[in-house]
Image (cartoon, grey):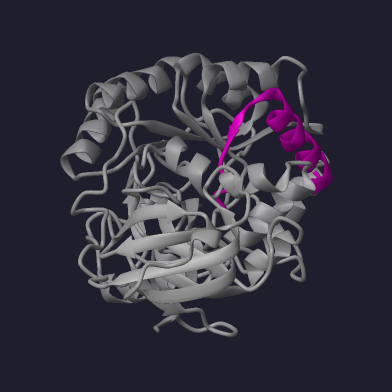
């Protein structure tokens, strides 16, 4: 599939007009830590060079310094219409368009305050995110529009229902015509919709293959919501580009067949486990019901995803932010920490939220410290190589070349 370029729709453009040098003794370039740190030179909205920290800064450039520097974070799975309250996606259905717009704006501010400079929205209501357009001072947004789902199925109230060949073709065509960045299809049921069976298939393999073929013909990638093991295997056979959750659930909990990790790796599908939650909050009622019904446990999921990484599966750190109180917007750093807890080396876990995430979602020029890349940076007051929890302490966020001071606790970031 073709990469998505930083065009007028996804870029914020024109915010930074000066020249600045950002220096740190610890630097992560999106894939690896740079020995000796780095000085990143920014002109306008772009990185113009990345030098060793010892090289110093050019004369006449504004200098910013921090303990650590890395690309702005990328959350590959959010719901901006979700405000983080109980049953948030259902609550959104009853909002007016004006109320929904306020929630989206607040959600983006919360993401930015956590150092997230790019989000991929994988389910809005009535195209509220997809047709909103880029706004100065906000993270870059990629959007799927309402997810394709069966009538009465998981997230059906968002407005994306389709059944049968003609409706599925029309659904993909509509997303292309409305400028969606990706097509999302709900292959299994989901926990957050009352009456939905998370283990049941919502579409056949022929249905999913049709959506994939129609989307690819239009230059769009397809990501599939898939919780059950059966739905994950179906997605692999149908050739989807990405799988959300990929929980591999059965009636007896999470399973990890010995052949699955290799199959996922060989397919080069992007897997987003949707980790990241506030640990001090109790599990959602839906999660508790799932645990009672199947024996699901997070410990089993962490073991499974650690195995996926060892098998070479492409992972991204999308969080599913906004869907309930334990998953507010801006929770992505905790997703990275949970991936470290799964056994991923710190550099690999950071890559799932920066360089590898950008590659996985086809977003060129994001998620890296590299000449010509968009100047979205995160400055920290600690060393994430030895203390990954430093991600929870953003110092300054640089958005398209403009420094923004991170709030001390909550609130919205403000221009420096």
Q: Give the answer, above or below, for where 362 lies relative to 278.
A: above
- Quarter of the view holding residue 297: top right
Is residue 318 covered in magenta?
Answer: yes
Is residue 136 covered in magenta?
Answer: no
- Quarter of the view holding residue 140: bottom left
Q: Give the answer, above or below, for where 166 lies relative to 107.
A: above
In this view, the residue in front, 243 or 346, is 346
Give the residue drawn at x 60%, y 21%.
Answer: 265
Q: Main secondary structure of the magenta part?
A: helix
Give the residue drawn at x 35%, y 56%.
Answer: 47
Percent x, y of residue 102: 34, 76
Q: Give the answer, above or below, for where 56 lies relative to 5.
A: below
**Is residue 276 in view from this perspective?**
no
- In the rendered image, the quadrant that contains the C terminus is bottom left
Percent x, y of residue 349: 65, 46
Percent x, y of residue 192: 57, 53
Give the residue drawn at x 74%, y 70%.
Answer: 281
Q: Magenta segment, which residues?
A: 297-319
147 on left or right of 176: right
Give the residue drawn at x 64%, y 65%.
Answer: 391
């Amino acid at each position: 599939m073709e990469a998505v370029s930083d065009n007028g729709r996804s870029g914020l453009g024109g915010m930074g007009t000066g020249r600045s040098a950002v220096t740190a003794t610890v630097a992560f370039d999106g894939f690896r830590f740079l020995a000796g740190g780095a000085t990143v030179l920014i002109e306008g909205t772009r990185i113009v060079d990345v030098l060793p920290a010892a090289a110093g800064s050019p004369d006449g450039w504004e200098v910013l310094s921090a303990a650590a520097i890395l690309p702005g974070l990328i959350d590959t799975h959010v719901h901006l219409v979700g405000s983080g309250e109980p049953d948030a996606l259902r609550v959104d259905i009853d909002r007016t368009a004006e109320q929904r717009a306020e929630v989206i704006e607040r959600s983006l501010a919360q993401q930015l305050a956590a150092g997230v400079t790019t989000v991929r929205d994988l389910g809005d209501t009535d195209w509220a995110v997809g047709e909103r357009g880029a706004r100065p001072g906000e993270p870059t947004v990629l959007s799927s529009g309402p997810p394709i789902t069966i009538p009465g199925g998981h997230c059906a109230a968002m407005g994306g229902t389709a059944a049968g060949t003609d409706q599925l073709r029309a659904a993909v065509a509509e997303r292309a015509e409305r400028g969606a960045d990706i097509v999302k299809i709900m292959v299994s049921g989901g926990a957050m919709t009352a009456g939905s069976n998370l283990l049941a298939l919502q579409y056949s393999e022929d249905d999913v293959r049709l959506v994939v073929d129609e989307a690819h013909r239009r230059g769009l990638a397809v990501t599939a919501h898939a919780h059950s093991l059966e739905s994950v295997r179906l997605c692999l056979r149908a050739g989807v580009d990405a799988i959300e959750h990929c929980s591999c659930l059965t009636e007896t909990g999470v399973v990890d067949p010995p052949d699955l990790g290799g199959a996922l790796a060989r397919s080069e599908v992007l897997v987003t486990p949707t980790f990241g939650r506030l640990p001090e909050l109790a599990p959602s009622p839906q999660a508790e019901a799932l645990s009672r019904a199947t024996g699901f446990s997070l410990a089993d999921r962490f073991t499974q995803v650690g195995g996926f990484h060892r098998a070479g599966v492409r992972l991204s750190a999308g969080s599913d932010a906004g869907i309930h109180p334990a998953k507010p917007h801006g929770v992505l750093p905790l997703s990275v920490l949970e991936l470290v807890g799964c056994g991923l080396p710190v550099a690999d876990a950071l890559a799932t939220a920066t360089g590898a995430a950008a590659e996985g979602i086809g977003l060129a020029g994001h998620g890296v410290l590299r000449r010509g890349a968009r100047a979205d940076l995160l400055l920290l007051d600690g060393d994430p190589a030895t203390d990954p929890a430093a991600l929870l302490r953003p110092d300054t966020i640089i958005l398209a070349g403009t420094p923004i001071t991170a709030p001390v606790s909550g609130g919205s970031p403000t221009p420096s």
